[in-house]
Every structure is written in C-alpha cells, then in structure tokens.
Image: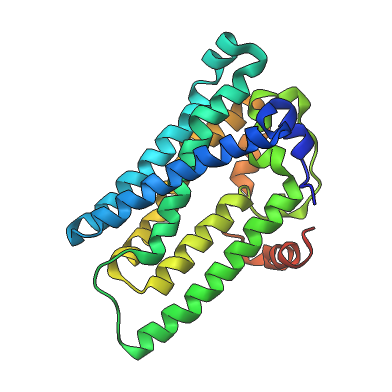
Amino acid sequence: MELKGFDELSRHLPELNSKGGQTRLALRFGGFFLLTTAYFIISDQIPTWTIDSQIVVMALGYLILSRFFTRKKIFIETYKEMAYQQAFVRFAIPGLAIIFAALAHITYMNGPKFTQPAITTFLSVLGWLCAVVGAILFVRSVFTFGLDYITMVYTYFPEEGRIINTSIYNVLRHPIYAGALRLGIGLACLNMGIYALSFAVLLPLGLTGWVRLVEEKELLERFPGYAEYRKNTPAFWPRITKLPAFFKFLFTGR
C-alpha cells in the first residue's frame, strides 16, 4: 500500500523512484541510528554519563535538523530545484535518525530504578497509556497528513502545498510532535529509572524550544495568520474542552 503523499515526495526526492535509491536512503538513516545507538550502549557503561549523553545527543539531532530550515535560502540559491533533496539528505535524515535513536534510548537508559510497588504500578499504567496514545496519534497524523507534509517538502516548495481538512489542527498545532512527546514520556515511565524520568521532564521543554525557535519561525514567515493561530491553539496538550475532538481524531483520523 502506497502512503499518502508518496508521489509528491518522490518528485522532489528522486531516490525514492528506484530500489537502489530507497536502499541508499534507508542505509543512511539506519547508519546514523546504529552509530548513535552504539554510542549510547558504550556511554551507558559510565552511569554518570547517561543523562548527560541523552541531552547532548538529542540536542545534536535537533541542531543538525535545524539546518534544514536555516540553510534553506542558501541551498535554494545554490541547488535550485535540487535544494530540498540536498537539504533532506544532508540534514533531515541524520538529524531525525539521531533523534529517533535518542527516543529509543529512553527504554534502556540505566540508573537507579523505582522498586516500590505503588510507584511501579502507577508508572506502568501511566507509561502504557502515554505510549499507546502517543503511538496512535503519531500514526494517525502520518496517514492523515501524508509523507510529503511529514518530510517537510513544502518548506522548500510552499506554492505546491495542499489544504488538509482535519479537526486535529483545531486541537493541537503539532500533532506529530505531540505523539512523539507522549511516546517518549511513556517509555520513560516504563523504564522506571530516575534518569529516564528526569529526561522526560526535560523533553517538553526541548520540544517547545524547537517549535518556537525553528519550525514556527518558518511558519510565521509563510503564513501571516499563524501568530493568531498559535495564540489560540496549544502545541502539544489539548484543552479540556477539546478532548472529545482529540479522541475522535485518535479513533477515526478525522
């Protein structure tokens, strides 16, 4: 089954039109993911490095990904129609691979663990709830918005953007990030470790910084009404009055 937006994405990322190109992209992503994971496995042998490594590596992933946005004008001037392809391969793939490896690291971060039955039961229930809701929200968003939006094609080709009619944008500004955030918090709760839970507290702060300083800066330039929309719509956590619409999207995708 071909995912929504694949044709639009493949027009600007020609590697997707051949098995060899798809393999090269997958190997690039997988290589950065595995190298990052190998680093975590090694650094976790030194207990005091665990939380520091997690923060530094996550920040590195965001820094690399941010260049996809900050280098846009230079890349368009240099590479013209190939600007998106060059930026995606150089910045988006390694940046996202490192970020996903850091999220996966939450599940096996070392450090002191909670062992009290009442606390572990609470963390287990909360962890599964957050992880399941986060995973469903993430997948629903991917299928609703399409690969072209998820891979930020229209950052480089705004004139080709299409309108997406979905209620979730009246509930959350960034449902993809909201899903990843819940998944990260859920994994930290299931880890039940002090370091993992400490990072879970920092995760919303880092993600808020990312959308405010990088992604929404781009959106404010492209859409004059975005400032008002940002004022009225939360980024990750729905208002109580919007919970029915939030769960409707989880169950129906609409």
Residue 70 placement (x, y as % from top left): 49, 24
Left/right of residue 150 with respect to residue 252 in the rendered view: left
To which quarter of the image does residue 64 belong? top left
Left/right of residue 193 with respect to residue 132 in the rendered view: left
As displayed, is residue 243 above or below residue 163?
below
Left/right of residue 6 with respect to residue 91 in the rendered view: right
Left/right of residue 162 with respect to residue 61 in the rendered view: right
Residue 158 placement (x, y as % from top left): 71, 25
The colour style of the image is: rainbow
Q: How many marks?
A: 0
Residue 107 placement (x, y as % from top left): 41, 65
Mark yes or no: residue 170 visible: no
Mark yes or no: residue 253 visible: yes
To which quarter of the image does residue 238 belong? bottom right
Quarter of the C terminus within the rendering:
bottom right
> Which residue: 60% across, 39% down?
23
> Which residue: 70% across, 67% down?
247
In the picture as drawn, the residue positioned furthest to the bottom comes out as: 117
Residue 236 placement (x, y as % from top left): 56, 55
As displayed, is residue 91 above or below residue 167?
above
As displayed, is residue 80 above or below residue 89?
above
In the picture as drawn, the residue positioned furthest to the top comes out as: 77
- Residue 46 or residue 59, whichever sits in front: 46
> Which residue: 61% across, 48% down?
174
> Which residue: 44% across, 55% down?
103
- Residue 20 or residue 56, whichever sits in front: 20
As displayed, is residue 185 above or below residue 178?
below
